[in-house]
Image (spheres, rainbow, N blue to C red):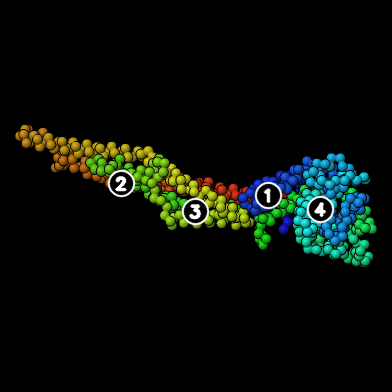
Amino acid sequence: MKLPRRKAEVSLDDRLEALAEAAGLAEGRLGQEAVDHARAVVARAGVRRGLSVDHTAVALAGATGSGKSSLFNALSGTELATVGVTRPTTAKAQAALWGSGGAGPLLDWLDVPLRHTVEGDASGLILLDLPDHDSIELAHRREVDRLVGVVDLLVWVLDPQKYADAAVHERYLRPLARHRDVMVVVLNQVDRLPERSVKRCLDDLRGLLAADGLEGVAVLGVSARTGEGVPELRALLDREISRRRAWSSRLAADVASAAAGLWAATRPPAAREPEPGAVAVPEVAVGRTLTRALAQAAGAPVAVEAVAKSHRHRSVAATGWPVTRWLRKLRPDPLRRLHLTGAARSSLPAATAVEVSAVDTALRDVGAAASQAVPEPWATAVRHAARSRSEELTDALDRTVAAATSGGVAKAPRWWRVAGTAQWLTVAAMAAGAIWLLVRFALNYLMLPELPTPTLGRAPWPTVLLLGGALAGVLIALLCRVFAWIGGRRRARRAAKALRDGIERVAGELIVAPTRDELDRYARFADRLSLAAS
């Protein structure tokens, strides 16, 4: 699996910074091993760049009997390494230094205590003879693994008998496929082969390396015993040393390998996901299903109906027939009964099991839709993000319902005052008619002269005022109830719209925003990996 490379050349500093950011973004999402490895690469690069860049640490690595130590002696022109035949003899890596000035801190970091200064013109070369990678001693193998992971240039010494050994290919060469620019493969002991077989073995070795992903890596046939091919190997090393870039090439390969490890932990092997740097973050929206489920669970229908009932209740209390309106005031206001007029918490009925299940299903649907274009385990993180703040929904929705329905107890409309005044005028007319009739009755009872009584047709005005006021009061009350019902419906519609807007706002803040943040986090992670792998 390969990460796409960017067209523009990217500096090592930018790639290291991108890898560090990608590791931080992957924290808690990917396996800790891949994240820790990426951070270790960044830390190691920081240390290596602070050490001598004029020295190149070249390691000779190989199996028991490959002639690695003999090649070390041939390259250094010394007899520093003890040569063995059937068993490992190198227990601790040792170094031969050409131009040792300033190499001490680098060797201290490499933890190579055995150091020998060699005379010669290869200034800047640090040649390391490693223990055998197939040693029966666990400490030897650990020493090889440690140094193979940090040296600037790797020279793998193979022999004609074991160059196809699966141990070296599977454990070292194949995992180091991204390090082909800082690797040389040497087929030692070619003097033991018939001349016609040397080319065939080298071609076969190149084929094996190509299968390991190391196509194009330098392959040389040498004989440490006869010196065949040693000058060519030495010339190749001299060229690398003179460039003074092996250390940065090694770090660049480490960064690319760590980025590939993070991406491998992200993408299932069989999945075909968008490549990093080209990730399209899907839109996350509050759908009707989610809004409806949240509204039902929050008791929005009950609250909206309470707005209509509250308006009618207050309208009747303000415009009803004064003789009977006091009975209306004995009933509680529907909104106040539900504590929807400014209380810390409302008294709306708790969501039923069916409503809770509907919300849960809607949240799962949001997470599933948002995570479709995202590979695991990021898809799991996206689905979790959609539910990460679900515990806050109850309080937020309750506050939203209270705020959206508070308009139900807003300032009374003007027609209430007009209707109320008219009702009191009818009461005044009834009172005037009643008093007038009482006065006539009293005068008649006391046998006093009657007062002149005007009439409306054949009906006396006191009777007209009394009965007409009562009838007018009832008619006004009935008419006001019609207007109250219309006004209640209008306020209920406004409350329903405000509730929808409020619920969508809550869903956007507590559901959509965390989901989108997680998607943006993945897109940023993929982009940083693309940069690190450049």
Q: Name the residue type under label 3.
A: Leu
Which residue is labeled 2 in the image? Answer: 481
State how far apart marks 1 and 4 are (Cα).
29 Å
364 displayed left or right of 33: left
Residue where numbered disc 4 is placed: 91
The N terminus: image quadrant:
bottom right
Give the mark toward the camera: 1 or 4. 4
Residue 218, quarter of picture: bottom right
Relative side of 226 to 420, left or right: right
Q: Where is residue 319 in the image (x, y as percent from the top left)?
A: 29, 41
Q: Answer with mark 3 or mark 1, whichever residue precedes in sequence.
A: 1
Sequence-first disc among 3 and 4: 4
Q: In this view, does 439 lie to the left or right of 145?
A: left
Between disc 2 and disc 1, whose residue precedes? 1
Tell us which disc is closer to us: 3 or 1. Answer: 1
The amino acid type of the residue labelled 2 equals Arg
Disc ID at residue 290: 3
Q: Earlier in the sequence, mark 2 or mark 4?
A: 4
